[in-house]
Image (cartoon, grey):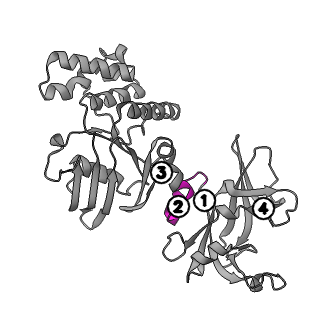
Amino acid sequence: MAEIRLEHITKRFGAVVAVDDVNLEVHDQEFVVFLGPSGCGKTTTLRAIAGLEQPDEGDIFIDGQCVNMLSPADRDIAFVFQFYALYPHLTVYDNIAFPLKAVKASSSDIQERVKEVAAILQIQAMLDRKPSHLSGGEMQRVALGRAMVRRPKAFLMDEPMSNLDAKLRVDMRTELKRLQHRLGATTIFVTHDQVEAMSMADRIVIMHQGSLQQIGTPQEVYNQPQTVFVAQFMGSPSMNLIDGKIQSQADVNPTSIDAGDLALHLTHTEVSVKLSAEQISRLGRSDEIIFGVRPEHIVVSKEPMEHGFQASVHLVEALGSVNIIDIFLGEAPETGDLVLLRARTHPSFRPEIGQPVWFDLDPKQVHLFDRHTEQVIS
């Protein structure tokens, strides 16, 4: 297998910058997922690596060799498409064997490698069938088999599971990760589904409007988002993000013994969050902040809490394993927009709409972003 390195890759389509100065290194045998919304540039980046798009600027290296001028066939990679791209008139055996026949491999070698791949993918009984007689999951396995049989340096996969039903996607996620680990294959996988990314990736590359937002392990991008976009995109429900302004505790509570300390007042609410010395040291000159906290890091109670805040229930979503509680904090007078805080609770906790509740935040799980740059304050 091989390393893949991108250096200052830029791709334009007319006035649209689809990929903007992307730098990335994918390590040997690593499973990297490109994650982002539609139109963020992830597929264009993948196609540039494959040679299906020519970058306007920058260099692409596979196994240490610059491949900018090499054709897709000469890059020794395998591409798995979203729509399988199987030949309908060929059997499963011939579809898998096609790349080997194209390079004129011997019949015995073709037979041995097709059977080996079919055994790994558990499709030995389907080798005589045509694609029209296969289910979506079976066609997915055949498309993977056709890529695997060549034993390429790297696998590139463009949303290969987007056409499968929900249960089959879960099964294929597990199967694909197991296969990647067994083969030791360098793999880049494109998806817009954060659950796929979190469950499969060694590292996630989050893209937005052609730019890299953050690169890290699933735990890093979830627990330590570097931008407002990443904080919003990762998690379901997504992170609560509320505008705030730094104030002195004296402005918030003149009788407080800590009146000289700073607090973050959440705009259009009665909530002010006291900041730790470490958080204050990170602020620098920033005073207009976006406050962030994930729903699972909020504690909600029907009884008064010593250090909590009182509010009312706006909505309850019962999801079976958890409840999502929308807590009403205030309203913007100029627009009428509601300021809500979403909390994840145990399914047994189900207050009525309009009922008063108390909530508290885990101060170690609070995220602060600069409102102007939308970058984390660190």
Give the amino acid at mark 3: Thr
Alpha carbon separation for disc pair 1 and 2: 10 Å
Residue 225 is labelled as 2
Which secondary structure lies at badge 3?
A: loop
Task: Give above or below for 38 relative to 276.
Answer: above
Task: Give above or below for 79 relative to 305.
Answer: above
Residue in view at x 52 percent, y 61 percent: 225
Give the amino acid at mark 4: Phe
Q: Reading the chain from its start, which is encountered first: label 3 or label 2?
A: 3
Q: Is residue 248 visible?
A: yes
**Residue highlighted by disc 3:** 217
Alpha carbon separation for disc pair 2 and 4: 24 Å
Residue 236 falls within the magenta-colored stretch: yes
Circles 1 and 2 in contact, beta carbons < 8 Å: yes
Q: Reading the chain from its start, which is encountered first: label 3 or label 4?
A: 3
Alpha carbon separation for disc pair 1 and 4: 16 Å
- From the top left corner, tell me how far across and down residue 24 is, in percent: 33, 56
